[in-house]
Structures are given as structure tokens and as C-alpha cells.
Amino acid sequence: MKVIYKPEDEEINSVSLDLKNRDFNEALKKTKILSKKYSEDYTVSKLFSMIYFSMKEWEKAIIYYRKILEFEKEKFYIYTNIGVAFFKLGKINQSIDAFKKSIKENKNFYLAHNNLAISYLEIGELEKAIYHFVYTLKLNKNDINAQKNLINILTLSKSKNENDHPLIKIDSEISKIKKNLNILNIYEDQNISKILEFSNKLINIKENLFFNETQIFRKNSTNLNCKRHFKVFDRYNIIPKYCFSCYKIEINLDKIINLIKLYLIFDNILLEDNNIRKCVVEIRNEIKGNYKGYIYCKGLNEAQKIEQIIEKEISIAKIDNYKLNIKHGCSEYYKSYPEFQKISSDEKTQFEYNKSWKEKEIIIDEEEPNRVEADKKIWKETLNGINLSDILTINNWIIYADKIGDYSYKPICKNKINNPYIIKILQNQLEFRKNQIQI
């Protein structure tokens, strides 16, 4: 009869302590030694799976998770981790299969439903994503991430059944406000006040509603890939080639009421290419200006055409004391490369792309997994019209304004709003922000 030897408790505990202390290399070193002593022990494979998952070595993690599946009673945990690993590898449909297996093992495991929804969202299956975000919240009503995900996806697609979840119902009612209140001039303070008052009465029905967004987007189906570009810049302090062709219109505003009006302009405006646009309150340390709007353009000529359109809309909305500039790339680049922000009428800059930077961009791109066509991310356009996400973000803007001493919101919002997150992010830059009220 064959005997399978098992590791001693103290050997397992030593590796577990390394994992707890995030000393993954030491944990791996010890586990490799254990694997030679106890080559057929299930516990060693389980340690390998945990270590490789923690080290983000996804393919190796999947191998070991599959090895231990037959020994695990609660297989839904393992399938969920396999699904996460596949997602990180860009194998979205295989992640979907794994999360489905997890749910088959335990239909009440809310995390598997949430992850399945995220995978569906990634490939543009919005109806299925909504269903599983709702299911997550039915299982765990206080899941803040699922709550945020559901609110965000409703800016891209509406559920066919308003009664599936209170957030869907609230979002639907908010989207009808302009029509129901018979609002003609949406830029008047009294009408903005009506919209906020009506919306917040609906929102207050829902308990434990947290939403920490500070930006409102109107997106098209183009991926600007800004996360990738900043990764290049942050690691190598170089400006990606793509950014040399990127221009944006930046509108600086002095009052929160004007930012809200600009958001309404961005929601209603018709642009030929439906350019990506956003309104934000500034939360980056030492970046001047508190209230800003951006419209992203493919070139200087397009930016100049849109500049004329937007100035007319600003005049109609009666936004005063604003500054409008066409900028090149992002402000974060200017400290390292001040010449980059200077542009001429022929779109040439005083600072050109260094061809030697290409090899560093390739390094970043090679770190991203290659996806087959069926797994590629689908970018959806934002739906126009006021939604729950917009109102919750505007509420955060109002908290921001109140905290820095801008009380221009009072004619449109008389009720006290609170969100500790906004207060926290202003904590270390409060005086700087107060000094930025006058632009």
C-alpha cells in the first residue's frame, strides 16, 4: 500500500505567515522545498495556487487551482478564483465559464455573480451584466462595488424591467424628470433646483447608497486608452506617441453652478463625432482650478471648430467668468516637458516625439495579454439624458463646493448633503482649493 506523506503543521504555518506578510518569494521558496518532500500532497498544490494567485502569475495559478478542485468541498471558491485569473489574462469568455461553474456549485455566492457581470460588461453583454449585478445586490444589498457597477452600467443601457431593483427604478424616474416637470429652459436656476429636489427625494428612499464619483462623462465608442498612456509616462517619464495627436478643449469655471450648467450643455450638445467630454471637480494635488470641462479632439482643426460651437452654448446657458483653452495632451506631462503644451496653428509643437521611446512603449504593451476577437473589450456610448449617476455625482460636487467655500449652489440646493469621501480627499488640499475659487 502506498503512503502519502503530509507536511507538518509548522511547515504549513510558516508559508501561511509569509503569505500574510506578502513575502511571496519566500513563501514560494519554502513551498518548492515542500513539494519535493511531499510531491503528491494536495496541501502543497493548494499553497502553490494561493502563492501564484497572489503573485499575479495567473496561468500557473489556474494550473494548481485545477489540481485541487477534486479535493475541495466548496468548489465555488476555486472556480471564482479561476475566473478572476482568466479575466486578468484577457480570456473573458473562459472567465465567464468559470464564474458560471461557481454559481452552479453555489447560486448564492454573490461574488461570483458580481464577477460574472463584470465579465459580461467587458464584452458588451449589457443586459446580462445588469441581471447579475442585480442578483448580486439581492444576495448582498450592501455590496458597494456592485451598487456602483449597477449605477454606472445604467449610463450605458437601461433595464427592460424597472422593478428588478430600486436603483433601476430610481434611475428610470430621474430620466423622465425633464419631461414630467415640463422643463423648457433647463439652464435656469429654478429648473435645475427642481431637477435636484425631485431626484434627491427619490434617492433618499434608498438606504445605504454610496457613490464616490467626481466626474461626469459623455463617451463615444472610442477608447482613448489613457490608463495605458499614463502607465508609460509614470514608469518611464516619456510621453506616448498617441498623445502627440491628442488635443482637448479645457473650460475652467469659477462656480459650481456654472459646472452644473456645463454638464447640461455636454449632455445636450450634438457634435459630429460625438466627441468624448467630461465635467469634473479637480481633486489632483496642486493642479490649479476647481471646476473644469473637457472635450477631447482628434486634432487642432477639430478642436477649433468645436470651440466656436461650445462658446455659443455657453452664452445661451449664461455661464459667466470662464476661461476656454485648447490644450495639447495632459497637464501631468507639462512639468517634465513644458514645451509639449505649446502648439502652433499648423499643429506642430516645439517638442517632438523621441523615436527611441517606442521601445519602452512596446515593453508596456507586451505586458498586456493578447485577446482573441471574442474577448476584446467593447466600448459603448454613454446614453444622453439625466441619470442617477449624474445626480449622485452632482451631489458630490455640491459637497466639494460647500467645503471650499463656494456657496453659489444655494439657490439650487437647499438640503444638506453628506459624503465623507469628498471631505477626505479635500483634507490635504483645502486651503489650496479655497484659493482657487477665483480663476
Image: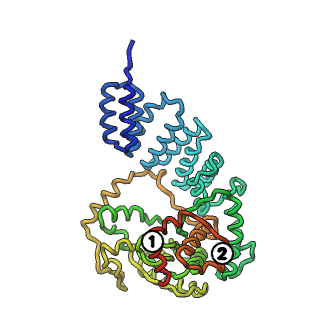
What crowding class fits label 1: few (fewer than 14 Cα within 10 Å), some (14-19), or many (20 or more)? some
Quarter in which the N terminus is drawn: top left
Q: Is residue 196 left or right of residue 280?
A: right
- Mark 2 and mark 1 in contact? Answer it, CB < 8 Å: no
For the point 36% across and 81% down, which residue is it? 347
Q: Position of residue 165 (x, y in %)?
A: 68, 54
Q: Nearest the camera: 186 or 141? A: 141
What crowding class fits label 2: few (fewer than 14 Cα within 10 Å), some (14-19), or many (20 or more)? many
Distance of label 2 from label 1 (alpha carbons): 25 Å
For the point 49% across and 75% down, which residue is it? 295
Badge number at residue 413: 2
Residue reaching furthest to the left: 356
For the point 43% across and 63% down, which residue is it? 225
Tell me the residue that label 1 is attached to: 429
Name the amino acid, label 2: Cys
**Residue 367 sits above or below residue 352 on the image:** above
Among numbered discs 2 and 1, the one appearing first in the sequence: 2
Q: Position of residue 232 (x, y in %)?
A: 34, 63
Name the amino acid, label 1: Gln
**Residue 333 sits above or below residue 148 on the image:** below
Q: Nearest the camera: 319 or 272? A: 319
For the point 34% across and 81% down, which residue is it? 342
Q: Position of residue 238 (x, y in %)?
A: 30, 67
**Residue 405 sits above or below residue 147 on the image:** below
Q: Position of residue 161 (x, y in %)?
A: 71, 55
Q: Is residue 171 left or right of residue 117?
A: right
Q: Nearest the camera: 282 or 408? A: 408
Closest to the camera, between mark 2 and mark 1, is: 1
